[in-house]
Image (cartoon, rainbow, N blue to C red):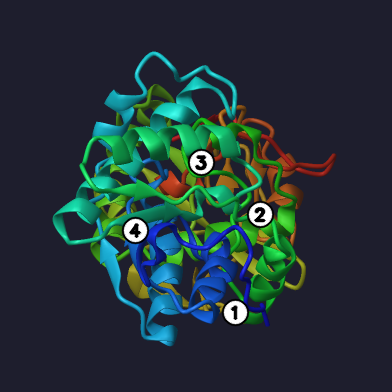
Amino acid sequence: MGSRDNTQDEVPGGTTRVLLHTCCAPCSGAIIEWMTLNGITPVIYYCNPNIYPIEEYLVRKEECNRYASSLGLEIIDADYDHTAWMCCIKGLENEPERGARCLECFRMRLLNAARYASEHGFTVFTSTLDSSRWKRHDQIVEAGRWAAAQFPGLTFWERNWRQGGLQERRSQIIREQGFYNQRYCGCEFSMNAMCDDKKQSRQRIRRLISVMTPEQKATQSAAVWERMERNETFRNATDILIYWSMEDEVQTPAFIRKWTAAGKSFYLPSIQGDELIVKRYTGSGSLKPGEQFGIPEPDGEQVNDLNPITLVIVPGRAFDSMGHRLGRGRGFYDRLLPQLPRALKAGVCFDCQKLPSVPVDGNDIKMDFVI
């Protein structure tokens, strides 16, 4: 547990009620604990339109809501407007981390917090941004002072939330609470510097997909297939190896039925031991649950001549712009794809599964393109 601190970091004006702009639960835990131990009641203000993609935003917000609820604290959910944030940092997209783009980002978010504080009777506000190792203290102070100056009678609390043992306590609370602990600041530009390993990438993607609704999955799946239908390789292909989707994958059944009726021949993988074999799809009525994972598979004979297949549509946990693919870790497709030398390989995924860089090794097979 943290301890009471009566040092120079006392809240300005001696108030016991502070608006706490919060960027994420991992950065908030030790700060909220310190405040409550020191007789201060934080009202949490969640305003982070910089976070990308939307699924990342929702996971971080969900963690903040869970933690606030467990402590009986009030949390204010500001609107998510990534388009407005992009306008705010326009022209600064290529700035390095901790540079001019970050300062403008802080100014926008802290101005929103300052406005809310002024309109709801707060005299002091502060931010958990100063807990993050991705941020510069001087930039946060500059942005906070500027935002406070726009509203008479409002003060930005400039305490450095990395000091006084709070960084160590931060790490302990993350472990205690099992927080989702992201490895980048939040925006698509900071994401470029993220260096996950395969295990971390799979865990992160799994959390992001978990917040998608069935409607969102259906909408994004439809968009993927619309792009696929415009692709020349798909239009020219008559024999296509595809997959029958699980709940956390781009949905395939309607797409397969549509183009089967239009005259294309589809094949589906079937798991046998540690290998994928290929079977012809002859209609959904011929499918049966697979032995290992219950994924529907054709109830028919193995297809040994794979030469007619000119396109393979491949699912994955993540893809990058270079065509690198991260699978589920069993290596099924990496062993199957070399058996299809005539087939082009197309990766398909939800938006949140597209990463700037996917961790790969020498056994991983690249895609020819990603939809």
Element assignment for label 1: helix
**Is 185 placed above or below 193 here?**
below
Q: Earlier in the sequence, mark 1 or mark 3?
A: 1
Q: Is residue 309 left or right of residue 249?
A: right
In this image, 93 relative to 332: left or right?
Answer: left
Residue 210 percent location from the top left of the image: 43, 68
Q: Residue 359: x, y in percent?
A: 73, 43
Give the number of the mark in front: 4 or 2: 2
Residue identified by numbered label 4: 46
Q: Nearer the viewer, mark 3 or mark 4?
A: 4
Looking at the rendering, in which quadrant would you find the C terminus? top left
Judged from the image, the secondary structure of the residue bearing numbered disc 2 is loop
Cα–Cα span, label 3 and label 2:
32 Å
Does the residue at mark 1 contact the one at mark 2 (Cβ under 8 Å)? no
Q: CA distance from mark 1 to mark 3?
A: 28 Å
Q: Earlier in the sequence, mark 3 or mark 4?
A: 4
Q: Quadrant of residue 50?
A: top left
- Residue for badge 1: 177
Give the residue type at disc 3: Lys
Distance (Cα) linking label 4 and label 2: 20 Å
Q: Is residue 279 above or below residue 134?
A: below
Q: CA distance from mark 1 to mark 2?
A: 19 Å
User: In the image, which is nearer the foreground, mark 1 or mark 4?
Assistant: 4
Q: Which residue is mark 2?
A: 162
- Left or right of 82: which side holds 328? right
Residue type beneath disc 1? Gln
Residue 265 appears anywhere in the view: yes
Asked if disc 3 and disc 2 are in contact, CB closer than 8 Å, the reply is no
Identify the element where label 3 is drawn.
loop
